[in-house]
Amino acid sequence: MKVLVVGSGGREHALAWKIAQSPRAEKVFCAPGNGGTRLVAENVPIAETDIAGLADFAEREAVGLTVVGPEAPLTLGLADEFEKRRLPVFGPTKKAAEIEASKVFAKEFMERHRIPTGRFRVVDSFDQARKVLASGEFGYPVVLKADGLAAGKGVVVCPNQKKAEDTAGEMLVQKKFGPAGRRVVIEEFLRGREVSFMVVSDGLRVQPLATAMDHKAAYDGDKGPNTGGMGAVSPSPLMTEKLFKEVLTTVVGPAVTRLLEEGRKFKGVLYAGLMITESGPRVLEFNGRFGDPETQAQMLRLESDLVDLLMAAVEEDVLREEVRWSARPSGCVVMASGGYPVHYEKGKTITGLDEAESIPGVAVFHAGTRFESGSYLTSGGRVLGVCASEPDLAGAMRKIYEGCGRIYFEAMHYRRDIGALKEERT
Ligand code: AMP
Ligand code: GLY
């Protein structure tokens, strides 16, 4: 069958790479793709947000499975349009994707169904926000979250009342996050360690993916601003069998069932970002998609066929597949443009890719790259994900950093501590 991957990041390169290995995938397309996806798929110049354009293409080419990477097309109703046209699609409908797109919906949903999460209040005016903050009900630090999608920047941890009031003003009065700031969640600050937990859902039942740990901060030692993710390892060193069962039975299992009951059947990857606190796991956020860069690390460990798994979900029979993961841990280190995640330049020449990939076991997934006149150029903030899977994590990280050492582009930066356990946030 023909498979279409929607998106242009490292996650999409890893998905297309794995899909291309399936005997069922006779042809793989990536829209719009990047400099690396062209090596495993045919890049199609259609924007990920051009829903009608993507659906027309899938119809014309008789695409048998469309896999959606990023959240934007999902919240624009890509899955709804594809389902309407009877085109098989892996990804939640707009209504189901609200679990990611609206923080207010997600928090109220968790409260309704007793899914463990931090205590919170929703406010829609600065006055209301000030009252809640002045009451000291959550203590400090406190976390403020703009309601809608804000490219990972709509969450602010505020150390004191002054900073919290200023942030509430930026969100609710100055509209720094646009319409996403019409409503704001004020949430208790949770202490502990973060774990990412993902499942493939067919709407009713779930197949867990290998666990992963993401490193969100820009610099070593979890310093600097939050990014989309600077690196990941799989499995998460923090996951135990007991915790795995607990998250499955108290968080993701119930979430999928309750979404179905509320008329929001969730087909796709449900991703729970969790804080493991002293009193157990608490949901920080849900995403309705694969993680980036977690996927890059996970795909290196996936031994069974990805197309089979995703088709089983699309056909609402996800448990028919046996999903097998290599016991060998894997890692992914993101090489980013200088200045990312704030201001950065594009168009820098990348060298050393072949030298890095000539190390046995090293895979380089492209994110913000384009191929032009025989060279690879940077075209985004996160540029490359250098990955490897080895008998132990330390060995995988050594190989990865050896690979990073062979790659160069002007002003590049990457973390040197991916895979190291984060300090507990206290
Ligand atoms: P979110 O987009 O909601 O996952 O938030 C982004 C990041 O902010 C998380 O990965 C956490 O590091 C941090 N964060 C979010 N909510 C809380 C919370 N209630 N307590 C502590 N840290 C939080
Ligand atoms: N790496 C975090 C995310 O994909 O949301």
Image (cartoon, rainbow, N blue to C red):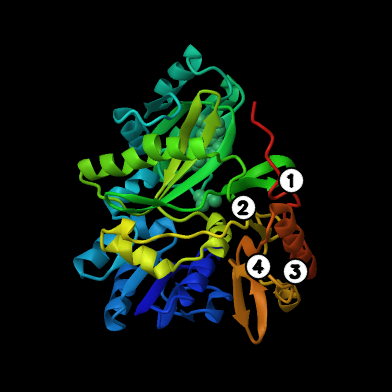
First in sequence, mark 4 or 2: give its number.
2
Q: Is mark 2 within 8 Å of ligand 2?
A: yes
Residue 346's mark? 4
State the image coordinates of residue 273 (x, y, percent, origin top left): 49, 41
First in sequence, mark 4 or 3: give its number.
4
Q: Nearer the viewer, mark 4 or mark 2?
A: 2
Q: Which residue is mark 1?
A: 220
Q: Amino acid at mark 3?
A: Phe
Q: Amino acid at mark 1?
A: Asp
| Residue name at image x 64 percent, y 43 percent | 225
| Residue name at image x 29 percent, y 62 percent | 314
Q: Nearer the viewer, mark 3 or mark 2?
A: 2
Q: Which residue is mark 2?
A: 232
Q: Calculate the distance from the C-alpha at mark 3 to the C-alpha at mark 2.
A: 22 Å
First in sequence, mark 2 or 1: give its number.
1
First in sequence, mark 1 or 4: give its number.
1
Q: Amino acid at mark 4?
A: Lys
* Mark 2 nearby-residue class (10 Å; few <14, some 14–19, many ≥20): many
| Residue name at image x 57 percent, y 31 percent | 157
Question: Would you say 265 lies left or right of 269 here?
Answer: left
Residue 409's mark? 3
